[in-house]
C-alpha cells in the first residue's frame, strides 16, 4: 500500500492555482493520487472549505472522496477529530455576521464592514462608503 504526505502544497498559490493543483493531485478521471492514502497538511483552510465541504469537485464530475480532520495534542497523545461542515465558515460570511452582531463594539463592526466590502464589491475602492470606513 502506498502512502503520501503533502506538506502545504497549495498555500503559496492564488485560488485558481490551488484548485488546479488539488484537482491534478486527486482527479479521479486521470492518473493521480486517487485510491491512495494521502495526508495533506496545510495552514490554509480555504481548500478545506471549498473542496471538502463545498463539494467543489462535484461540479467537475470528480468523485474522489475527501475528508478533513484536525489534530490536537492531549496529554502527549495526538488525537484526530473530523472537521464537520458546521465547523467551517468562510471569511465573507464571518465578516457579515460580525457586522450584523449588535453585541460587538462599533469599532469591530466598522473594521469588518470595510473588510466585507473588500471581499464582496468588485470595485470597492470606488465606493464612497469604503473611504469613509
Image (cartoon, helix red, strand yellow):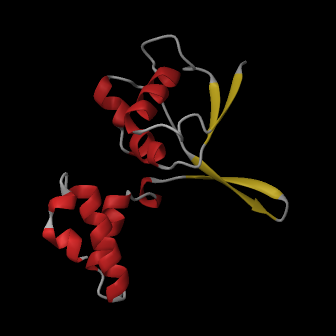
Which residue is located at x 47 percent, y 21 percent? Answer: 24
* The image quarter in which residue 50 lies: top left
Say whether residue 121 is left or right of residue 92.
left
Q: Position of residue 61 (x, y in %)?
A: 32, 22
Considering every residue shown, the one lying at the far top of the view is 31
Which residue is located at x 57 percent, y 20 percent? Answer: 33
Say whether residue 39 is left or right of residue 16.
right
Considering every residue shown, the one lying at the far right of the view is 76
* The image quarter in which residue 7 lies: top right
Q: Position of residue 9 (x, y in %)?
A: 58, 34
Labels in figure, total = 0
Which residue is located at x 85 percent, y 60 percent? Answer: 76
Instruction: From this view, report whether residue 53 is shown above or below residue 72.
Output: above
Query: Which quadrant, please, contains the C terminus?
Result: bottom left
Choose between 111 and 131: the one closer to the eye.
131
Instruction: From this view, report whether residue 116 is shown above or below residue 1.
Output: below
Amino acid at each position: 500500500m502506498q502512502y503520501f504526505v503533502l506538506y502545504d502544497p497549495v498555500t503559496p498559490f492564488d485560488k485558481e492555482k490551488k484548485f488546479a493543483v488539488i484537482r491534478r493531485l486527486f482527479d479521479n478521471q486521470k492518473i493521480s493520487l486517487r485510491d491512495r492514502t494521502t495526508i495533506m497538511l496545510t495552514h490554509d483552510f480555504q481548500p478545506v472549505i471549498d473542496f471538502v465541504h463545498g463539494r467543489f469537485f462535484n461540479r467537475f464530475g470528480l468523485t474522489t472522496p475527501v475528508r478533513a480532520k484536525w489534530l490536537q495534542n492531549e496529554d502527549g497523545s495526538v488525537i484526530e477529530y473530523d472537521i464537520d461542515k458546521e465547523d467551517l465558515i468562510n471569511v465573507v460570511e464571518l465578516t457579515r455576521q460580525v457586522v450584523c452582531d449588535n453585541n460587538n463594539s462599533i469599532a469591530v463592526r466598522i473594521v469588518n464592514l470595510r473588510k466585507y466590502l473588500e471581499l464582496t464589491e468588485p470595485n470597492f475602492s470606488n465606493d464612497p462608503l469604503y473611504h469613509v470606513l
